[in-house]
Amino acid sequence: PMGFQVASSCGVHVGDGSTYSPLGSQGTSLPSHLTQFILFPPETSVSCVGHGREARISVSPAVPGSRSTMPAIAGKVYLFRVEVTNPLTTPSSNHWLLRVADQEFSGILGFDLQEFRESSIQPSNTAAGDITSVKLNFWSRTSVRGVTGSRHGIILITMPSGFALQAVNGLCSGFSGLQNSSRVVGDLVTCEEWLGNPQRIVLHNRMDSALAPDKYEFECQVENPGLPTPSLHWELASYRTEFAMDEDLLDTTLVEGFAVNTKLSSFAVEPWPGGSQRSGFEVTLRVALMLDSAVRSGDALIVRGPEEYTSLCEGGGFRSQLLPRPACSGARAAFSFANFTDATVPEILPKDVDGATVVTFELGAVNPETKPIRNILEFVHCRGVGSTSIPERDLFQGSSVCPGGAFAVASVQRELWAVVPKIREVTVGLITQKVAAQNQSSNVRLSFRLVSAGGSQLR
């Protein structure tokens, strides 16, 4: 199947005609009920040439000039073996083909690899040195057992060098449980640092029951490397016991991680008018920054606010002396330089150059009705967006800030100001229609609708 690789010499082995070494070693024996296998004739010579996913095996007598026959026998199959390198994942079309002389047999069902499927990693922040909340998704194909005697199963995640798990007393920060396809599986599945090594995350299954094959996800907090790094693989592996020995391995896979980019060191954002911000009121976001690298043709500067903001380009609130008018969608605004040439891109000098340019701009918005769950504004300098005109909708595709095919040159995140939600539908009335005299008490009914959940006091 696609993905398998055969070595140039194949490592072909047919045995000596008397032992079942193709199934293991010369000491390998078969149970009496296995009668379908037969061996190549003794004194058989084989050679093999491997190319890509194909092995071409030549069979001949070991003694030149002699004859060796391999008759077709009903209900019997000849044994041989070749060495292959497994792909990173089980092929979607997992069938093998065998061709012998002018005969061909296709549709031979292959074997499933010991692996996780549909694995992914989604960071909340890709800036170097920052803390990011990382969401890991994976499909476990094998049960990870619970407590059996003094042993239990684990899932071990090894991050690339430079990443560090954030933990308190050995427990993962930001972990709120392992979620399967329908629910959180229970608080006896814990997320911990592996033996004092912050580069490794371990999920311990201390439940009485196993983690059944299913799709799972969890989040924890990780510190990004202090310097920009390319996207590297994260390793996921599950084991029968907490000792994580090779013989206990269940499933494994390599997951594409995420690139870590430069963190913008000169960035500020403030609201106008200043002071306390009330829900439903118009506000202007005033931003000032210095870029770490010059803007090129095909770049984009993207602003992403909390999801609760329905528009970052409200009305005519945009102002800037350098930047083009942004494209907007919900809580995102994108300043695209896809239609510029290098000669027409505004000259924006990066911060390490004499006379560095201070870029300022304003965006109009309306404060949301509720307090944002994640009250963060993110600014990203993306490269590789395109050098020709692209539809505005393509600037906002996918969960990452930069559109597909582009990458982040630099980014920064800032916590925004608090928004005070406005209590709705407030009414005050007498419980009885009788009006009491001055300085006498009355019973009143106060009704209102809260916008934010979790209130514990009314003042």
Image (tube, rainbow, N blue to C red):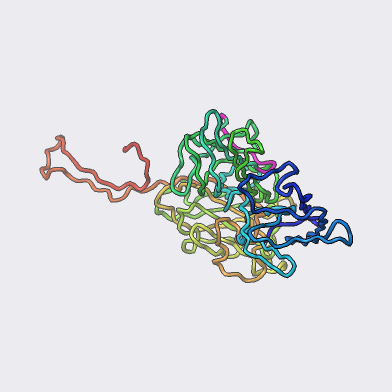
Above or below, 195 relative to 270? above
Foreground of the two, 382 or 272: 382
Residue 206 colored in magenta in the image = no
SS assignment for the magenta stretch, majority: loop
- Left/right placement of residue 109 relative to residue 444 reads right
Q: Looking at this rendering, what residue extends furthest in the right direction?
A: 64
Foreground of the two, 193 or 418: 193
Write the residue at 65% across / 34% down: 197
- Left/right placement of residue 445 relative to residue 108 reads left
Q: Would residue 133 be visible to someone looking at this image? A: yes
Q: Looking at this rendering, what residue extends furthest in the left direction?
A: 434
Looking at the rendered image, the quarter that the N terminus falls into is: bottom right
Task: Please provide percent x and percent y for residue 292.
Answer: 69, 52
Query: Which range is magenta?
Result: 159-169
Write the residue at 28% across / 47% down: 448
- Left/right placement of residue 187 relative to residue 394 reads left
Foreground of the two, 23 or 436: 23
Write the residue at 67% across / 63% down: 97
Task: Please provide percent x and percent y for residue 347.
Answer: 70, 61
Residue 166 colored in magenta in the image = yes
Task: Please provide percent x and percent y for residue 453.
Answer: 37, 44
Q: Would residue 265 be visible to someone looking at this image? A: no
Foreground of the two, 69 or 154: 69
Task: Please provide percent x and percent y for residue 441.
Answer: 16, 35
Looking at the rendered image, the quarter that the C terminus falls into is: top left
Write the residue at 55% across / 45% down: 142
Displayed quadrant of residue 227: top right
Above or below, 412 relative to 390? above
Displayed quadrant of residue 192: top right
